[in-house]
Image (cartoon, coloured by chain):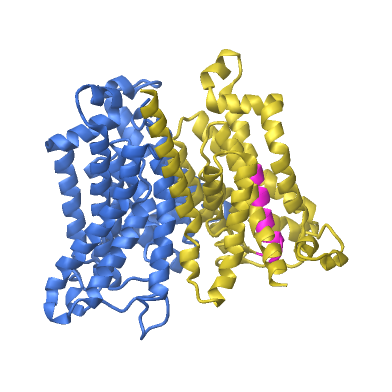
Chain colours: A blue, B yellow
Amino acid sequence: MVDMTAHQGGGGSELFSRGFGLAFPFLVAIAVSALMLLLIGENPFDIFTLMANEGFGSQRRISATLSAATPLLFTGVATAVCFRSGVFNVGVEGAFVLGGLAAAFIGFTAPAEWGAMIILPAFLFAMIVGAFWLYVPGVLLARLDVDEVVSTLMLNFVAFGISGYLVNGPLLSESSGNNVTPLVHEAAQLGRLLPPSTLHAGFFLGLFCLAAYAFWTRRTADGFEAELVGLNQRFSRAVGISIPSVIIMVMLLSGIVSGLGGASHALGQLHRFSEGFSPGYGFTGMAVALLGRNNAFGILFGAVLFGALASAGTTVQLFSDIPLDLVNIIEGTVMIFAVVELGRITLFRRRRAT
Amino acid sequence: MIIEQVIAASLIMTTPILLAAIGGLVNRQAGIVNIALDAKMLAGAFVAVVVSSATGGWFVAVLAAALCGAAIGYLFSLVITRAKANMIVAGLGLNVLVAGFLGFILNWFYNSSGTLRLPGVHLLPHVFPESSGNVPVIGGALADLDPLTLFAWGSVLALPWLLANTRLGLRLRAAGNAPQVARAVGLSEKSLQDFGTAFAGFFSGLAGAHLALASIGLFNEGLTAGRGFIALAAFYFGRNRPVTTALVCLLFGFLDAAQIRMQTAGLPPKLIGTIPYLMVLVALCLAGWRNRDRKAMAQ
């Protein structure tokens, strides 16, 4: 079935084209950024070596990389769940932000006597908020055929507006500055794994989500049906799969994972919610899912790669004056060229039902 | 007096949204949803500031911004039409890429993080003499009127005719609405779509130039503040009709202008800022509802 849609052009063996497909967007991104570095008279090889070293050179640096990769594990999975069914959900960012706000809210309002138990309702609330946030565009798509790209894109801005209002108004911390909520209770903070670094227990939750995603895609009937819908809607309908239910299911799953990601970032990393809570984790998550071809190992690889870029980018800016924006150049190029390939291989825009 | 100020401010705030929306609308008529209007606006704003400072002329700056936008749009289009990239993801990627690219240049060549302030930047001139400010009610708007605003509204009025009666307009719409037909009569729908995307880039570049040169005369990384997406919202809400879209833009421009005043009146500006997006959601739902009912009736 896959092969039917796989090749419209280009030969070579399946395995080769897959391997090349994985590396291709990243190679282009490396080429583009190398060009930028040459343009400013730096030796790209030196800079890339420095970045690799800063990303993976020692235990401390690896834990910084994994810490930066943690939110991307969640947003990568949340994006992939939808993309593999052909549902173009670009609203992970909004659900992530609101999930984080929800968890932080429970984290500082719940009575401190609950101790570490606060973490449970905090995660639960974040899951509910995230699920609800993406349920809305899911239902709109499934029942009214409302274009999910536009609806989720618009909902992102609504989420930014709502969270920006709350964090500057009703939930503003009295003690410290502006744009931040109070800190969550100490007991509600997720444990740090390797103390000087910010790597926290949320990383394991991210790995768990990834494993659950892998299980869901490979071992469950729902996951299989969701993939079929992504491959061929007419066929799926013909064999009796309810496409509206699949759409709603993947949007709910995406919302839950996004919410969990926001909660983990709020309780583990920042210990509060602040404006600018997410520097585009949802969008980087798209790059991660695309680079990883919606495959669990691919997502892990993509998340660690972008985590390394983010953490190395900061230090490289510090030591060599190379602007941190280089990371954005790489990310944008990866996104563009990941779909250049995908356009040929799997991810087709769903044909609308008539 | 306050009404006069609000009208003037709304009109100024509308122009960049309107210019970008015109571009996006034509692009969508040709079959491409352009989600990277914001990137081209940002690039246009940057180029406008740099060129205006270097040459001391506003017209050259505006033209350079538009051409830069068109060039980016054309390349972007090639990725979509020739390399078959998904237009949504590629668009979001372009937004990230252009922002990163500009940030990089800003940081390295101008040694500044985020803001570019150059000497000798020429702002857009006013079309009417100062004395036009004495006209009641719309005086403020008249006195502030700049050539780009005039051009934007002129385009809105010309566009319905251009799309319905010229060869190019009809072909563009054919490329979007009936690509098979376009191909059957020997048109290259891909080239037409490339033209449409370059056109959108041209107008987004103008929009960026207006943002940078209308009053502030500098470039900032956050200058567009998501206006490319507001423009997207506008032509979705205006259902691709030029005049309706323009009126929606005017409403969004008014909200943009009113935000500043509402802040002083104690209304939360962040929540007001979500209105355009919520409006689009409602409009999409209503359209979906109508289509479903129509389908149900037909059965």
Across and down, in percent, residue B178 comes to: 53, 22
- The image quadrant that residue B154 belongs to is top right
Q: Is residue B199 left or right of residue A89?
A: right
Q: Position of residue B296 (x, y in %)?
A: 36, 28
**Dominant secondary structure, magenta:** helix
Q: Nearer the viewer, residue A112 or B278?
A: B278
Task: Establish if B18 lies above or below A62.
Answer: above
Asked if residue B172 lies in the magenta stretch, the reply is: no
For image coordinates 75% across by 58% down, the residue present is B52
Count of numbered tags: 0
Residue A58 in view (yes/no): no
Identify the residue at the far front of this view: B297
Residue A68 visible somewhere in the drawing: yes
Identify the image quadrant of residue A187: bottom left
Which image quarter is the C terminus of chain A in? top left
Q: Name the residue nearer the viewer: A345 or B176.
A: B176
Question: Residue A11 lies in what quarter of the image?
Answer: top left
Q: Residue at x 24, y 40 (%)?
A: A295
What's drawn in magenta, residue-wise?
B201-218
List x then y, in percent, for residue A60: 26, 67
Q: Nearer the viewer, residue A260 or B237?
A: B237
Depth order, front residue of B193/A320: B193
Quarter of the N terminus of chain A within the rendering: top left
**Residue B206 among magenta residues:** yes
